[in-house]
Image (cartoon, rainbow, N blue to C red):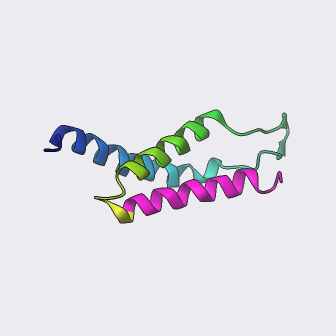
Amino acid sequence: MPNPTANRVLRTALFTLVLLAYLSMGLWSPAGAYTKSGRVGVSPGLAVLMAAVLIVSLLSWNRYRLVAALGLTACFLWLATTLLPVL
């Protein structure tokens, strides 16, 4: 029998992290972009956030498929925005 507390924590993490991923879109920039202070690399905070979104989305795919798909879409958009201009 699954643990209801773990399911509640996973559901809360999923909904919170997916929302944060979409709210952070304004902070995304290509890894090779330049600002006044110099070259911008991949932001470590956003990388951790997207890794967490990816893991939580994969773990909750069976129960919350729509929100997990939104989370995976946010991860792939972040990868495309960050790494594609560098390649």
Which x, y percent locates residue 27?
64, 47
Percent of width and height locating residue 86: 83, 51
Disc count in the image? 0
Q: Residue farthest to the front? A: 1
Residue in the image at 62% along x and 52% along y: 26
Instruction: Name the residue at 79% across, 39% down.
Output: 40
Q: Is 49 one of the magenta-colored residues?
A: no
Quadrant of res 47: top right
**What is the span of residues highlighted in magenta in the rendered image?**
67-87
Q: Viewer-proximal residue, 63 or 24?
A: 63
Quadrant in the rendering for residue 67:
bottom left
Furthest-left residue in this view = 1
Q: Along the horizontal axis of the image, is 75 left or right of 42?
A: left
Residue 1 image position (x, y, % from top left): 13, 44
User: In the visual, does 2 lie left or right of 61?
Assistant: left
In the image: residue 3, left or right of residue 60: left
Q: Residue furthest bottom?
A: 66
Q: Does the magenta stretch include residue 71?
A: yes
Q: Which x, y percent locates residue 20?
A: 47, 48
Q: Which residue is drawn at 23% across and 45% down?
A: 7
Residue 87 shown left or right of residue 56 in the figure: right
Residue plotted at (47% across, 56% down): 71
- On-image quarter of the C terminus: bottom right
Q: Does the magenta stretch mainly form a helix, a strand or a loop? A: helix
